[in-house]
């Protein structure tokens, strides 16, 4: 039993294998937070909550009880206006204009398994024994507002998920102004704040900031989770590092506007809040209606950032990603984007695919430019009809020709967009997100379809399904290349205009559910100008994401390292591209490019026909090598060893679950004259096993030696050089 309720002291004890989370219902019905952290066996008699009278500036809801102020009470889901003056978890406006609420405990239920979240992506169980769920119903009895707080405990995974559901059971219209998914109060303030920040082409760089009294937040107001901030934060205790110390991770399963914040108050406590961004958001809750917030996946570890990451990796790989490809190794692909951009025809595609076959490539992906009159990015989005000038015999013919070469065929779409220069826009100028009489600002000469509208969603489902039915398409790259501006919908009334961005996400999720379940054999990869929507929400529908438009091997070290803080390797697309690199013009060797790209779903994104015979031999070997280790890389445990954010060297490794195999990647960014001798201390191996170093035949080294003394790194000359090692335990 991972959820226990003690009626005597009114405490809930949620426990995983290694962690405890304790909630108490106070005498006055407030839901107080007592502990989240290392597992504690029994809380029965301990005095976890000390109530003390504080200064008069922290008001008391009950005048006869000066020891109680919500301003100082650690709470599970704080209301606004009833004495807690820190960040509230939610704000609801009544018909009389007031925004004061007062939620009290009403009842609770403990369920086996995990219910789904209506309309939203979430983690799931495959059998009810995998998790238990606690639903606590809180109520503001004056207005009939119920808030159901949901906690699911994945005992074996060491994970707790949370969300909140609002139900208007009163007699008046309520307007939600803020509805976060979680609020967690910590009784300390000595934390650092880890987040993943960036921009287009340099996504998810690790930043660790110190916290001080006040608020530190990250958010997105862009209508997508964004390149700039990932919907993830972690609090790190002051001593925490990659392998040791307490860390608390918060990951939001949502692809739109979000807020994540840590607030340190006057009494040195820290409140973490996370959920849909309240900025430019409201939601009208009519009588009888329900509003569900997205889910936050919370991971505590006292074994450092690395252990937290592996916990997320395993859960997201097995209980967030879905579909046929969840447990299947991913194909080696070639994508024609950086090879041809818009300038291709059927012969060119077939030529690239022919070389692909020689090299061992398994999937050809036809990127942007195959439809409408799309010779540049200034038109045709929305017109999902093949361009007969480029592909006179159509998609079916091309896909079959590629299939006949022994490669599967994949196709690019950007379904959520509309070009002003398109037949679709000429027919339906109101179908884009816009505000009447305002400019419709373009980005990459395109506008965004209004997915808050059901007719638009149905159009997308039909248009994309028709293409997928028309040819043997085994893979889809689902792209999205701009952020929202002038946010509004032609179909929503004034009171609901500020619901547009969230309704868009709900529409997108409906569309994705419909298309991915209608085509269960297709491998879907999401993309948003690279990693502009690399988030758990998208991974629920599509088990992999194009990590970044920056495919330079050295830039990719930071991007892939940062991405791995939360997301498993099997979710990251990584390709070898041409040199000089198209994003930064850096020249790196084919080996380094492949060594880095192999730490993901491997592929090539260049014109294979331009390879010399010597390069072809090298590439064929790379592909053969990747195929022999891809299961280990895509599904093994990842250990980060050296961070590109901290020095000139980067290293990480993958270890199979049985610890019999490992693959290590090391990259030195710049050459160093007269360098020191270096050893790489490996991680995650079995200290009692002997490992054969495949690169140096007959070299057998103990797991203990490899981890405690390290692997010798030979001298490397030249910039941007990499080494990989493969270990196999002896006796296999
Ligand atoms: C942005 C993507 O990230 C690229 O990989 C490519 O598909 C282009 N869009 C095509 O327009």
Image: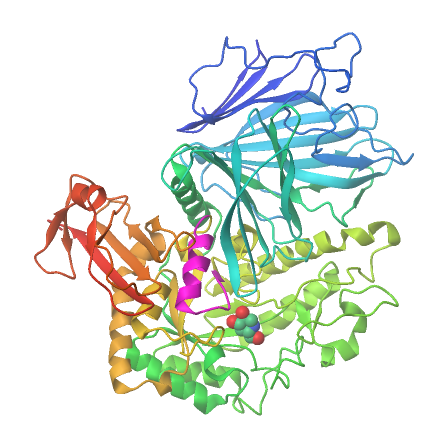
**Residue 212 sits above or below residue 28 on the image:** below
Q: Position of residue 691 (x, y in %)?
A: 15, 49
Q: Report whether 151 appears left or right of 443.
A: left
Pick the front one: 402 or 536 = 536
**Residue 599 sits above or below residue 690 on the image:** below
Q: Position of residue 104 (x, y in %)?
A: 72, 22
**Residue 388 sits above or below residue 424 on the image:** below
Pick the front one: 306 or 383 = 306
Residue at 77% in and 25% down: 102
Pick the front one: 305 or 32 = 305
Task: Please tell me in which quadrant of the rendered image residue 189 appears.
Answer: top right
Which residues, given as a range, are shown in magenta?
A: 545-565
Task: Please tell me in which quadrant of the rendered image residue 433 appears.
Answer: bottom right
Residue at 54% in and 65% down: 527
Q: Quadrant of the N terminus?
A: top left
Task: Please tell me in which quadrant of the rendered image residue 373 appears.
Answer: bottom right
Q: Position of residue 99 (x, y in %)?
A: 83, 33
Q: Report whether 543 appears left or right of 613.
A: right
Q: Could one spot residue 393 in this view of the protein?
A: yes
Does the magenta segment cover residue 546?
Answer: yes
Residue at 26% in and 56% down: 663
Q: Position of residue 70 (x, y in %)?
A: 71, 21
**Residue that extends furthest to the right in the rendered view of this protein:** 96
Does the magenta segment cover residue 337?
Answer: no
Q: How are the colours assigned in the image?
A: rainbow
């Amino acid at each position: 039993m991972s959820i226990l309720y003690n009626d005597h002291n009114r405490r809930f004890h949620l426990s995983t294998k290694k962690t405890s989370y304790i909630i108490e219902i106070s005498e006055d019905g407030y839901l107080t937070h007592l502990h989240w952290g290392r597992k504690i066996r029994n809380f029965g008699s301990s005095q976890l909550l000390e109530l003390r009278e504080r200064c008069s500036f922290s008001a008391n809801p009950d005048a006869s009880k000066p020891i109680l102020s919500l301003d100082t009470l650690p709470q599970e889901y704080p209301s606004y206006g009833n004495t807690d003056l820190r960040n509230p978890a939610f704000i609801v406006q009544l018909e009389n204009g007031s925004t004061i609420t007062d939620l009290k405990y009403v009842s609770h239920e403990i369920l086996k398994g995990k219910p789904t979240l209506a309309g939203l992506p979430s983690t799931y169980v495959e059998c009810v024994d995998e998790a238990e769920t606690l639903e606590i119903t809180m109520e503001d009895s004056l207005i009939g507002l119920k808030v159901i707080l949901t906690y699911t405990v994945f005992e074996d995974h060491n994970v707790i998920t949370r969300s909140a559901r609002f139900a208007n059971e009163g007699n008046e219209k309520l307007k939600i102004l803020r509805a976060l998914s979680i609020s967690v109060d910590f009784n300390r303030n000595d934390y650092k704040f880890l987040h993943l920040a960036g921009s287009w082409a340099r996504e998810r760089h690790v930043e660790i900031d110190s916290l001080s009294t006040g608020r530190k937040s990250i958010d997105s107001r862009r209508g997508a989770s964004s390149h700039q901030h990932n919907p993830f934060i972690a609090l790190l205790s002051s001593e925490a590092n990659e392998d040791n110390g307490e860390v608390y991770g918060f990951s939001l399963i949502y692809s739109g506007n979000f807020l994540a914040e840590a607030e340190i108050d006057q009494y040195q406590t820290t409140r973490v809040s996370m959920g849909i961004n309240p900025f430019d958001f409201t939601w009208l809750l009519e009588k009888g209606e329900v509003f569900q917030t997205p889910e936050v996946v919370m991971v505590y570890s006292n074994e450092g950032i690395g252990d937290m990451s592996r916990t997320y990796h395993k859960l997201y790989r097995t209980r967030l990603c879905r579909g046929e490809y969840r447990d299947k190794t991913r194909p080696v692909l070639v994508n024609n984007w950086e090879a041809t951009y818009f300038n291709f025809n059927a012969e060119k595609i077939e030529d690239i695919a022919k070389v692909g076959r020689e090299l061992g490539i398994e999937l050809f992906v036809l990127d942007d430019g195959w439809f409408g009159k799309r010779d540049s990015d200034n038109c045709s989005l929305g017109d999902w009809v093949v361009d007969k000038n480029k592909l006179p015999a159509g998609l079916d013919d091309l896909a079959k020709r590629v299939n006949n070469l022994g490669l599967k065929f994949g196709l690019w779409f950007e379904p959520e967009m509309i070009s002003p220069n398109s037949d679709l826009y000429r027919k339906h100028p109101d179908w884009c997100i816009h505000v009447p009489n305002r400019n419709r600002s373009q980005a990459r000469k395109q506008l965004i379809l209004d997915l808050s509208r059901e007719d638009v969603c149905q159009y997308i489902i039909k248009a994309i399904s028709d293409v997928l039915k028309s040819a043997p398409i085994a893979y889809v790259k689902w792209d999205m290349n701009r952020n929202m501006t002038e946010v509004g919908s032609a179909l929503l009334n004034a009171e609901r205009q500020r619901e547009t961005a969230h309704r868009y996400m709900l529409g997108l999720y409906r569309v994705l559910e419909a298309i991915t379940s209608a085509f269960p054999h297709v491998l879907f990869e999401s993309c948003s100008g690279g990693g502009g929507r690399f988030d758990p929400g998208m991974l629920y529908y599509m088990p992999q994401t194009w990590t970044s438009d920056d495919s330079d091997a050295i830039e990719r070290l930071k991007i892939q390292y940062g991405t791995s803080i939360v997301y498993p390797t099997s979710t990251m697309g990584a390709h070898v591209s041409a040199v000089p690199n198209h994003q930064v013009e850096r020249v790196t060797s084919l080996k380094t490019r492949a060594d880095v790209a192999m730490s993901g779903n491997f592929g090539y994104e260049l014109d294979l026909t331009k390879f010399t015979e010597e390069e072809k031999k090298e590439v064929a070997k790379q592909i053969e090598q990747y195929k022999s280790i891809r299961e280990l890389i895509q599904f093994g445990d990842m250990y980060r060893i050296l961070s590109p954010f901290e020095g000139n060297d980067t290293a990480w490794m993958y270890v199979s679950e049985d610890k019999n195999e490992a693959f290590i990647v090391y990259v030195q960014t710049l050459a160093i004259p007269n360098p020191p001798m270096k050893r790489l201390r490996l991680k995650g191996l079995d200290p009692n096993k002997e490992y054969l170093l495949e690169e140096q035949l007959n070299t057998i080294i103990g797991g203990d030696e490899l981890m405690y003394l390290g692997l010798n790194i030979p001298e490397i000359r030249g910039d941007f050089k990499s080494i990989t090692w493969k270990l196999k335990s002896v006796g296999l």
